């Protein structure tokens, strides 16, 4: 014993004496004394502290490895640490024991002494093998002799060789075929190949093979031989010697098997040190047994007390399907399912089957043999002498398991069970850290972490996330505990937890927050009212049910608070605090739930009130349709109209569609209301025709919710009342969101709709998830440009670029374009110049009721569109905020025959450019709204063919030179100007414009 503290040595000695270990001990505390004691006599085992004042444990281990490497060395230390433990084991230590766990010391010493004994036996076996090989070499020249007459097949087989196989001389015919029949099938082919090679190439004939003995076993032989060749080169005779090497082969096989088992034991012990996961432990242990131990199959099963059977939890090797059919019942009374597995667990003893083929208890014998199994062992995994599972190992050789291997494999099973016990204790501690022991729900800490992760993901993805925290508090729960007892309170909490899990479908986002508090993380798609629906439709109905307990029916009431991310808080702590505060407020206000923000509470109640009203609106005929005309930009005539639904709420009056249509879609009412819109549109259409009017087609917006209906095409067909071809009065407008859902099915539905004569338009194109790949597959007729782009089309180059791109895209796909929200003549003229087909907006008409639309049709009102100029007029736009400058330049340049257009601001300049074909622009640099260079830069993007000149008395050289470099400005002139020079620069600008026009294709 290497220990510098006598007080630490005494408990070790006492522990070994309690374990009834017969021993004597010597204690040293320095390297010098250690060497002296070892020279005096070698001990059976060495125990050493790891950390000492004058001597280190690793130093002592190095001395022991040097002087007596075969003596087991075990560390017994108060603390050693995982890294030090691994380092010690790698350096040759047999084991390590912690001083607070000395109960493991005696078994560890027994195991170490057994290992040392096995190693000595292995060493002796190796030496015996070497001696056997030496004797074989010495006796090879005088071994059993055999010969073979190749032509006749007659052979002389040694009677001694036959005797070793258990046969009498006369029992085996002296022929080559009789000899070959005794050889193991695989070896037989190898021997024949060796014969053929020797006869053909005269290579040495030297083989080892197995021959079948009379008792069914195989014995090994080592044969050498030499052929005799005739003058014609043909082999006629062969003779040689044969020696029995069975003992040598068995010794080699035993060493090989022991080495494999040692490799498995070593690898699994390393696995136990590093793994913290039972699934990883089981799976890797099976893989080590197959890869390092060369077992055909390894699997681990754990007992299931509810099913009263063993369940396989990990496996490796051949035969996963084989495991499924093994009887694994643990009930001795169930003969059909109780087998060797059940007996192993029942008796807590290993079961070995050394010969599957001839064992009568094996029920899956054929399946095992076909998979190459010849023997197997079942080793129980026990914790505190209680079996909790087994490890099963299947070998490809008969009689694989001998005494030494069985001892090692039992030790292996014990180590795995010990590790499993340690992991279960760690898992229990982790569980209690994050879960409530009474209800089994996550605790506040875990829910807080999950909410933090949701918020973190939402911030990282920069998306609008709809997250709510619900805080539920049981009212007067303290009274229940005081009057009915704490056991009643605990039972009620468990029922509430179970009902919450039932309402939510899982406990992933549910937690017990404290004594009588529960928390829920909820997500919603659009509006917070969805959270109120969750409470009123799923959670409250379950919580409101009475609870039967000890013959009584108990009713609980709850206060519920809700906080929203990010409105009520940007982090989990804040949301928790605000949800709890809202729950207290809900008790004061008398409501069942309360949002933290008062305004949100009002909005949600308003939302729910509106849903209730909408359920009655259709029946009460509160919906009505208005129609907004669409007109052609080529002749100004009305080409169609869009049906727009309105809701006349008896309390609030007309409600905006942006408010109630999302609620219709969310509640599914849009399906019924959508059918009403189709019927009402056709009804109005037929009324106009009965008045002698010629109404154009009506476009009806169809929600994606309606399109998801497989019956929508049939509904539409019934609404059309037999209209066909060009007589069909309806068009359908869909949104781009349809591209994102079940594309193939939607394409087929749209083709079915087109086949009815209904035309299709994509509404608000460019604002959703546009997919050009799907656009070319959808059978649409129109693209509608959203009004958000049209609104800024004459001022914003980006909006103009989008509009132009949509127009070009549509025309290239042979589609027409409708621009929505056209309110000014400037917008109309710009879109007309860009070849937009139709417009819709207040410029022509606001949405009208059916009667007013009929009057508009009767009047034959058309839109006055831009007229095409009869000839080319040279036009100059002058932009300057000083009226005197505008008047002066108008007088100067008019004499040259130009049409002068004047604007006193950039905004007015954009309006003129949208309505007039201007070739040259002259702008002042210093203006209130924007500088001349900025104005001309935008003008270049909107009207790239114009020639642009900046004129100013102030020289902002940096911005002007930058504009010139980017091509935004053709020239820069200063104030005051020279009249003739200015006139010449303008003439040069028009010449430059004409030259550029001549270079354009087609001109």
Image (spheres, rainbow, N blue to C red):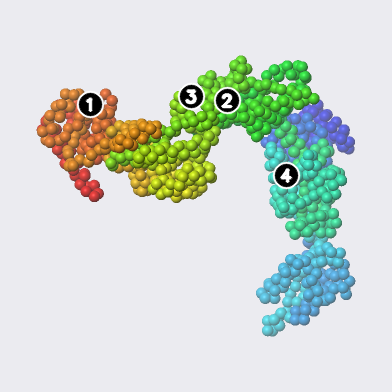
Q: Mark 2 points at which residue?
A: 572
Q: Where is residue 609 in the image (x, y as percent from the top left)?
A: 54, 25
Residues at marks 1 and 2 touching, judged by CB atoms closer than 8 Å: no
Q: Quadrant of residue 630?
A: top left
Q: Mark 3 points at which residue?
A: 650
Q: Residue at x 83, y 63 (%)?
A: 217
* Label drawn at residue 313: 4
Q: Residues within 10 Å of mark 4 (few under 14, many from 20)?
A: few
SS at circle 2: helix
| Residue nearest the viewer, comparing 8 with 475 | 475
Residues at marks 2 and 4 touching, judged by CB atoms closer than 8 Å: no
Residue 862 higher or lower than 886, as above or below: below
Q: Where is residue 861 in the image (x, y as percent from the top left)?
A: 30, 36
Q: Name the residue under label 1.
A: 904
First-in-chain label (2 vs 3): 2
Asked if residue 818 lies left or right of residue 573, the reply is left
Q: Where is residue 246 in the image (x, y as percent from the top left)?
A: 81, 62
Q: In which quarter of the image is residue 654?
A: top left
User: Disc 4 vs disc 3: which is toward the camera?
Assistant: 3
Q: Position of residue 660 (x, y in %)?
A: 48, 30
| Residue nearest the viewer, comparing 223 with 975 | 975
Q: Residues within 10 Å of mark 1 (few under 14, many from 20)?
A: some
């Amino acid at each position: 014993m290497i220990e510098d503290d006598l007080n630490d040595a005494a408990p070790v000695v006492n522990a070994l004496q309690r374990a009834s270990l017969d021993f004597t001990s010597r204690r040293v505390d320095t390297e010098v004394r250690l060497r002296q004691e070892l020279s005096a006599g070698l001990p059976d085992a060495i125990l050493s502290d790891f950390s000492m004042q004058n001597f280190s444990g690793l130093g002592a281990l190095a001395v022991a490895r040097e002087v007596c490497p075969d003596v087991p060395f075990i560390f017994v230390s108060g603390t050693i640490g995982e890294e030090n433990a691994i380092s010690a084991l790698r350096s040759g230590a047999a084991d390590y024991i912690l001083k607070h766990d000395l109960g493991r010391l005696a078994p560890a010493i027994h195991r170490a002494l057994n290992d040392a004994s096995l190693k000595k036996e292995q060493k002796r076996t190796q030496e015996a093998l070497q001696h056997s090989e030496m004797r074989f070499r010495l006796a090879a020249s005088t071994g059993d002799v055999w010969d073979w007459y190749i032509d006749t097949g007659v052979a002389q087989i040694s009677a001694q060789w036959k005797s070793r196989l258990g046969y009498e001389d006369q029992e085996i015919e002296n022929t080559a075929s009789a000899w070959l029949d005794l050889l193991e099938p695989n070896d037989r082919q190898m021997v024949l190949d060796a014969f053929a090679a020797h006869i053909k190439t005269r290579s040495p004939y030297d083989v080892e093979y197995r021959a079948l003995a009379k008792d069914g076993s195989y014995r090994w032989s080592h044969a050498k031989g030499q052929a005799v060749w005739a003058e014609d080169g043909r082999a006629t005779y062969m003779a040689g010697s044969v020696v029995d090497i069975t003992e040598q082969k068995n010794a080699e096989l035993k060493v090989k098997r022991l080495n494999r088992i040692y490799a498995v034991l070593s690898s699994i012990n390393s696995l136990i040190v590093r793994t913290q996961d039972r699934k990883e432990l089981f799976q890797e242990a099976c893989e080590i047994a197959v890869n390092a131990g060369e077992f055909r199959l390894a699997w681990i099963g754990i007992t299931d007390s509810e099913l009263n059977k063993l369940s396989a939890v990990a496996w490796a090797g051949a035969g996963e399907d084989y495991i499924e059919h093994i009887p694994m019942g643990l009930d001795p009374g169930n003969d059909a399912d109780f087998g060797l597995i059940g007996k192993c667990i029942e008796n807590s003893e290993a079961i070995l089957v050394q010969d599957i083929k001839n064992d009568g208890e094996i029920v899956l014998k054929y399946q095992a043999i076909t998979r190459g199994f010849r023997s197997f062992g079942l080793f129980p995994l026990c914790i505190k002498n209680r079996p909790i599972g087994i490890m099963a190992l299947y070998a490809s050789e008969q009689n694989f398991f001998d005494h030494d291997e069985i001892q090692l494999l039992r030790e292996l099973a014990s180590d795995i069970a010990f590790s499993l016990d340690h992991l279960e204790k760690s898992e229990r501690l982790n569980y209690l850290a994050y879960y409530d022991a009474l209800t089994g729900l996550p605790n506040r800490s875990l829910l807080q972490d999950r909410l933090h992760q949701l918020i973190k993901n939402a911030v990282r993805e920069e998306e609008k996330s709809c997250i709510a925290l619900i805080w539920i508090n049981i009212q007067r729960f303290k009274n229940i505990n005081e009057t009915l007892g704490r056991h009643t309170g605990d039972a009620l909490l468990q029922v509430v937890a179970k009902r919450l899990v039932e309402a939510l479908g899982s406990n992933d986002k549910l937690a017990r927050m404290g004594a009588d508090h529960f928390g829920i993380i909820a997500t919603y798609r659009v509006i917070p009212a969805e959270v109120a629906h969750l409470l009123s439709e799923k959670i409250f109905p379950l919580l409101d049910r009475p609870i039967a307990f000890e013959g009584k029916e108990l009713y609980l009431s709850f206060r519920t608070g809700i906080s929203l991310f990010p409105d009520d808080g940007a982090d989990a702590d804040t949301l928790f605090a605000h949800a709890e505060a809202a729950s207290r407020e809900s008790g004061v206000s008398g409501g069942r739930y309360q949002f933290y923000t008062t305004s949100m509470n009002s909005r949600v109640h308003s939302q729910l009130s509106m849903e209730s009203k909408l359920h009655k609106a259709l029946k009460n005929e509160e919906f009505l349709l208005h129609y907004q005309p669409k007109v052609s930009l080529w002749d100004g005539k009305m080409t169609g109209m869009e049906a727009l639904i309105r809701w006349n709420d008896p309390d609030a009056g007309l409600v905006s569609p942006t408010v109630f249509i999302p609620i219709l879609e969310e509640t599914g009412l849009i399906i019924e209301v959508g059918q009403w819109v189709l019927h009402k549109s056709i009804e109005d259409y037929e009324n106009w025709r009965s008045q002698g009017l010629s109404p154009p087609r009506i476009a009806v917006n169809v929600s994606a919710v309606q399109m998801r209906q497989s019956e929508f095409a049939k509904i539409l067909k019934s609404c059309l009342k037999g209209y066909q071809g060009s007589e069909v009065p309806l068009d359908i407008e869909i949104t781009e969101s349809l591209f994102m859902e079940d594309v193939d099915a939607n394409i087929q539905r749209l083709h079915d709709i087109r086949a009815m004569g209904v035309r299709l338009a994509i509404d608000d194109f460019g604002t959703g998830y546009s997919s050009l790949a799907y656009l070319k597959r959808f059978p649409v007729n129109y693209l509608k440009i959203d009004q958000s782009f049209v609104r800024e089309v004459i001022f914003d180059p980006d909006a103009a670029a989008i509009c132009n791109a949509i127009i070009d895209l549509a025309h290239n796909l042979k589609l027409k374009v409708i621009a929505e929200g056209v309110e000014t003549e400037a917008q109309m003229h710009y879109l007309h110049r860009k070849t937009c087909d139709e417009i819709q907006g207040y410029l022509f008409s606001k949405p009208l009721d059916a009667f007013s639309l009929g009057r508009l049709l009767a009047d034959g009102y058309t839109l006055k569109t831009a007229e095409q100029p009869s000839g080319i007029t040279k036009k100059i736009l002058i932009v300057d905020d000083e009226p005197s400058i505008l008047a002066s330049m108008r007088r100067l340049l008019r004499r040259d025959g130009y049409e002068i257009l004047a604007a006193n601001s950039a905004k007015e300049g954009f309006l003129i450019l949208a309505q007039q074909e201007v070739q040259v622009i002259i702008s002042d640099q210093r203006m209130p709204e924007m500088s001349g260079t900025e104005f001309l830069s935008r003008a270049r993007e909107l009207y790239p063919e114009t020639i642009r000149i900046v004129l100013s008395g102030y020289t902002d050289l940096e911005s002007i030179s930058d504009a010139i470099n980017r091509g935004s400005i053709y020239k820069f002139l200063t104030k005051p100007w020279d009249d003739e020079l200015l006139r010449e620069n303008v003439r040069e600008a028009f010449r430059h414009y004409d030259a550029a026009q001549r270079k354009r294709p087609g001109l």
